[in-house]
Image: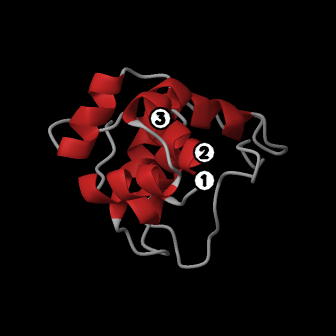
Amino acid sequence: MAQSLRPQALQRQRLFRDMSVEQLAEAVGVTPRAVRHWEAGTRTVGDRAFGRLLEVLRCGAQDLTGREPGTESLADLRRDAGLSTEEAASALRRKRGAHGLHISAEKTAILSVADVCAAGCGDLRRPWGGWRT
């Protein structure tokens, strides 16, 4: 699922970091054309690219989306971490006590649809970009 962001916010963060479109594209692993589309608002950012944008720009999802902290859904948090539903399910399966729960990407996606994280649930990413387990 693609992530919605405010195009002006992306451009502002890029310029604040003193990066060209080409530098940002290379750091995120996309083409400069993709970054130009995102900044123009003509295309949305994929989940993994969104997670890499947050790491490269060293900003929070709220800085790019305008989303209020504490209103994140499970899907928002997963995307912010740059994880696919399968990667999130895999991380959950590795948790102690998860044996026998039969966690799948499909179940993770279903849970993500309507679940809203309570205020103060925190960031799924560690400062170095890893998944908190």
Q: Is residue 35 above or below residue 73?
A: above
Q: Most extreme residue toward the bottom, as rendered?
A: 119
The residue that appears at 34% across and 25% down in the rendered structure is 32
Query: Between marks 3 and 2, how big is the CA–CA gap?
Result: 11 Å
Give SS at disc 1.
loop
Q: Is residue 120 above or below residue 110?
A: below
Residue that label 3 marks: 24
The residue that appears at 33% across and 33% down in the rendered structure is 35
Q: Amino acid at mark 2?
A: Glu
Residue that label 2 marks: 55
Give SS at disc 2.
helix
The residue that appears at 47% across and 44% down in the rendered structure is 79
Closer to us: 13 or 49: 13
Q: Is residue 40 left or right of residue 62?
A: left
Give SS at disc 3.
helix
The part of the image, by quadrant, that contains residue 98 is top right
Query: Between marks 3 and 1, how big is the CA–CA gap?
Result: 12 Å
Q: What's the mark number on residue 96?
A: none
Are circles 2 and 1 on residues that touch, CB within 8 Å?
yes
